[in-house]
Image: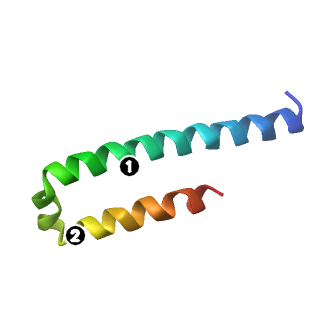
């Protein structure tokens, strides 16, 4: 595999990772809306999850 091919494969891998993270964030959000008290034991709020989702894409750019 050439360096260019390795670089492209790495970029595709990062894109797949981001897609999994985005799907996971959506599913966690659904769970937290149904069970908001889950966050209490870590002293977190749903707003913390919202911030996580808003910052997810910029993390991967």
| Residue 32 at x, y percent in the picture | 21, 53
| Residue 25 at x, y percent in the picture | 38, 49
Query: Dot 1: what SS?
Result: helix
Hey, which quadrant is residue 15 in on the image? top right
Q: For this view, does 31 lie left or right of residue 19? A: left
> Upstream in the sequence, badge 1 or badge 2?
1
Specify few, some or many for label 1: CA neighbours under 10 Å numbering under 14, 14-19, or 20 or more: some
Q: Which residue is mark 1?
A: 25
Q: For this view, does 6 lie left or right of residue 25? A: right
| Residue 4 at x, y percent in the picture | 88, 38
Q: Nearer the viewer, residue 1 or 35?
A: 35
* Residue closest to the far bottom: 43
Query: Dot 2: what SS?
Result: loop
Specify few, some or many for label 2: CA neighbours under 10 Å numbering under 14, 14-19, or 20 or more: few
Residue sitting at x 87%, y 38% = 3
Hey, which quadrant is residue 46 in on the image? bottom left
Residue sitting at x 50%, y 58% = 56
Hey, which quadrant is residue 61 in on the image? bottom right
Q: CA distance from mark 1 to mark 2?
A: 15 Å
Is 58 placed above or below 13 here?
A: below
Q: For this view, does 60 lie left or right of residue 8? A: left
Residue sitting at x 64%, y 37% = 13
Residue sitting at x 80%, y 41% = 7
Is 26 placed above or below 48 here?
A: above
Q: How many marks can you see?
A: 2
| Tag 1 and tag 2, C-beta contact below 8 Å | no
Q: For this view, does 11 lie left or right of residue 37? A: right
Colour setting? rainbow
Q: Which residue is mark 2?
A: 44
């Amino acid at each position: 595999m050439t360096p260019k091919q390795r670089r492209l494969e790495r970029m595709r891998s990062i894109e797949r990772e981001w897609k999994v993270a985005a799907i996971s964030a959506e599913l966690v959000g659904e769970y937290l809306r149904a069970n908001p008290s889950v966050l209490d034991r870590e002293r977190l709020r749903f707003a913390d999850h919202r911030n996580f989702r808003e910052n997810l894409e910029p993390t991967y750019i």
